[in-house]
Image (cartoon, grey):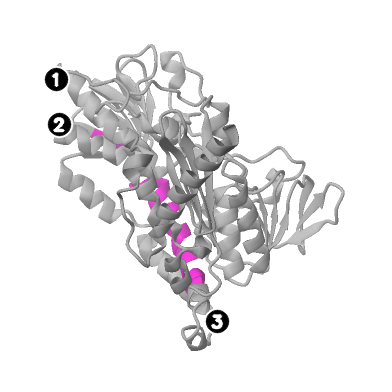
Amino acid sequence: MQRSEYDVIIIGGGAVAENVAERAVQGGLSAALIEHELVGGECSFWACIPSKALLRPAQSIREAQAVEGAAEAVTGTLDVEAVLRRRDRLVYDWNDQSQVDWVDSTGIDLIRGHGELAGEKQVNVTAADGSTTLLTARAAVVVSTGSDPVIPDTPGLADSAPWTSRDATSVKKVPKRLAILGGGVVATEMATAYAGFGCEVTLVARHGLLTAMEPFAGEMVTDALREQGATVLLNTNVTKVERAADGVHLDIEGGDPIVADEILVATGRKPRTEAVGLETVGLKPGDWLPTDDTMRLPGFDWLYAVGDVTHRALLTHQGKYQARIVGEVIVARANGDEVFDEPWGAHVATADHEAVPQVTFTEPEVASVGLTEAAARAAGYTVSVADYDIGWVAGAVVRADGYKGQARMVVDDDRRVVLGVTLVGPDVGDLLHAATTAIVGQVPIDRLWHAVPSYPTVSEIWLRLLETYRLNMRKAAQADR
């Protein structure tokens, strides 16, 4: 018999919500997950996992082609149908039974249906058959409903049956021609994947690519996409979209029209909060849910939010980090234990502000953490920048012929600690956690000198960045004399 009261109720059943519930149960509380789609959510079935499954095969071929000896063995072309079969296998053919089994094994209750707030500590669940159940939370309610793609108000776009990221990652038949609107992570990753399939890709960005990152990242990805056969139009506006018998027609401001079989819109996200019952507690439906650093909404002692809906960092791993914080702090507050809410304490999501790692799985990969040079200066830091061509590192030379890569380290000169690192090149995502650790730990530059990278590996880039930083400081000191 289903209970009607829980210590913690989580609206949403994605990867972030699962982490909240798990921490709550491990702390001795009862927890319920409410999910109306697939348990495991966006990341497991429509985003992180399927997108990387689509990207990896073509990347593997190009990696082999970049090494003499291996290149001669690569004689075939990409089997797109096999790629899609592998993608289907990795998402379990969009069957969430394995996730459900895990939830059951942890002692979390899973309630299928659409959950929405119905007042203080009250959640109403509407099942697929229309029946409703009112649940009460003794300690907390957590909103973890994620985000949805934004469809711009470009004339004709909404009526042209545009793809969103879900369509792109769950595709059953790859179109011959694909137009992509956007210049961010989803747009560039899907442009990379579909170019690898042999699709005629046209990427249209209103500005540049990956503009929130260091400028060289977007520039290198732009060059690589063009080398892969994609058409990349920067600083370009689409004025009208229309679907006709021969495909989707895009009118370009000041340019020639584009015709494609499908159009993917990847221009941003909005919170999935339109139908979560926010109005019942005095909040506005459709709004983001900003929180304090314990992930609690200001003005409430029982309402929390995690993941995309907070608009803090729209990344699965960062949402899981927030979820771990929330689970722990709810347990502490429910038990009357001390809450450690100072920066970097056990109950605050401090890393969301200046230590967020992200890997963009384009080719080349872009791995970044912390602040860019521009963001650091805007935040008031006195900074120095060390740049280095990763292709000059011995590990890169043996890894691939003609390795192309670039690295930047941003240093706070006053404290002599690393504020940000950006790496562009093959598989640089594997180097990122060392940078993340240095930033979160605020490890002094002088101590990092003693973290010796193994030779010959690409991680030797750390030594080269530190050497470059030291050389820059000497030159600056000499110039001041």
Q: Nearer the viewer, residue 77 or 357?
A: 357
Percent of width and height locating residue 435: 39, 46
Q: Which is more N-terminal, label 2 or label 3?
A: 2
Residues packed near mark 2 inside 10 Å, few (<14), some (14 to 19) or many (20 plus): some
Mark 3 and mark 2 residues within 8 Å of each other at the beta carbon: no
Can residue 55 be found in the magenta stretch?
A: yes
Q: Nearer the viewer, residue 394 or 403?
A: 394
Checking the image for residue 221, the label placed there is: none
Q: Tell me the magenta residue range.
A: 32-60
Q: Secondary structure at mark 1?
A: helix
Q: Which is more N-terminal, label 1 or label 3?
A: 3
Q: Secondary structure at mark 3?
A: loop
Three-letter residue code for mark 3: Thr
Q: Which is more N-terminal, label 1 or label 2?
A: 2
Three-letter residue code for mark 2: Gly
Residue 38 in view: no
Name the quarter where the C terminus is drawn: top right
Three-letter residue code for mark 1: Asn
Q: Which residue in the rendered view is the most extreme toward the front? A: 481
Residue 217 in view: yes
The residue wearing badge 3 is 77
Residues packed near mark 3 inside 10 Å, few (<14), some (14 to 19) or many (20 plus): few
The residue wearing badge 1 is 335
Residues at marks 3 and 2, CA–CA distance in whole angstroms: 52 Å
Q: Is residue 277 above or below residue 407?
A: above
What secondary structure predominates along the stretch shown in magenta? helix
Q: Residue at x 23, y 21 (%)?
A: 340
Query: Is 10 on the left or on the right of 82, as rendered?
Result: left
The residue wearing badge 2 is 27
Percent of width and height locating residue 287: 52, 25
Residues at marks 2 and 1, CA–CA distance in whole angstroms: 9 Å
Q: Nearer the viewer, residue 398 or 16?
A: 398
